[in-house]
Amino acid sequence: MVEFDDVSKVFFKGTVPIQALGRLNLSVREGELLAVVGPSGCGKSTLLNMTAGLMKPGTGAIRYKGQAISGANTQVAYVTQKDNLLPWRSVEQNIRLPLEMGPHKRLSEAEKRERVARYIAMVGLKGFEKHYPKELSGGMRKRAQLARSLVYEPDTLLMDEPFGALDAQLKLMLQAELLKTWEGSGKTLIFVTHDLTEAISLADRVIVMSGRPGRIIAIADIRLPRPRDVFHIRFQPEFGDYFEELWAALKQDLASGEAAT
């Protein structure tokens, strides 16, 4: 679904170059849930921004369904760390927003209403359609953001630490909601997180990135059965094995970075 071919990225702070990504090669399979883990500043969000077409690679190419990404990639949905709900629009109106632009404007009014209602129910916000963002809890705002990203039914969903700022109980609940929504949908999902436990609980495959410049230092195929219970799955013996394998790579890289500084 997505291919990174010899991709690198350099940013500039004034005239000083800062290499965010080393040369990176990665193929994301159609329908898989890929988790990306690594320290702050290793280029995880940069990968998502380039996949969304919001940023160009410095070298190499990124292809989506075999076509080079040369501008905004309207075939993907992007769930950022902040929910970015419009405060003057209700839950219903916020979720409807993607249907008011681009090719989705041509949908009939009845189909727009049906889609909005379906995704509101899917994320558990039925009864809160007329509420405004300031009237919602943090978790409910995240649900509304997820529904807004899904309502125009993209093939690929990009998620940048969407649950990072939430408490542990709410995070577990939303992880379960995400899996329930994704499993069986056929959608491709690229999920960035700092949390190894979250990555293993959700993903088909986890990649670990090094400190800057970011490069892939470990890949693990997570062969835990689906559907998954995000709470109980961590008590399976295989879960601990995956954690040890990925943490060893991450820990070694962090230690090397400290030694270099």
Image (cartoon, grey):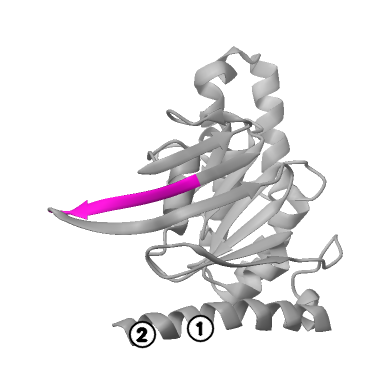
Mark 2 secondary-structure assignment: helix
Cα distance in 3D space between marks 1 and 2: 10 Å
Q: Residues within 10 Å of mark 1 (few under 14, many from 20)?
A: few
> What residue is drawn where x is 71% and y is 69%?
201
- Asked if the magenta segment contains residue 10, the reply would be yes
Q: Can residue 81 be seen in this view?
A: no
**Which residues fall within the magenta stretch?**
6-14
> What residue is drawn where x is 40% and y is 56%?
21
Give x and y (percent) for residue 187: 71, 41
Give x and y (percent) for residue 198: 64, 70
Q: Closer to the N terminus: mark 1 or mark 2?
A: 1
Give x and y (percent) for residue 252: 51, 83
Amino acid carrying label 1: it is Gln
- Asked if the magenta segment contains residue 164, the reply would be no
Which residue lies under the disc numbered 1? Answer: 252
Which residue lies under the disc numbered 2? Answer: 258
Amino acid carrying label 2: it is Glu
Q: How many labels does the image show?
A: 2
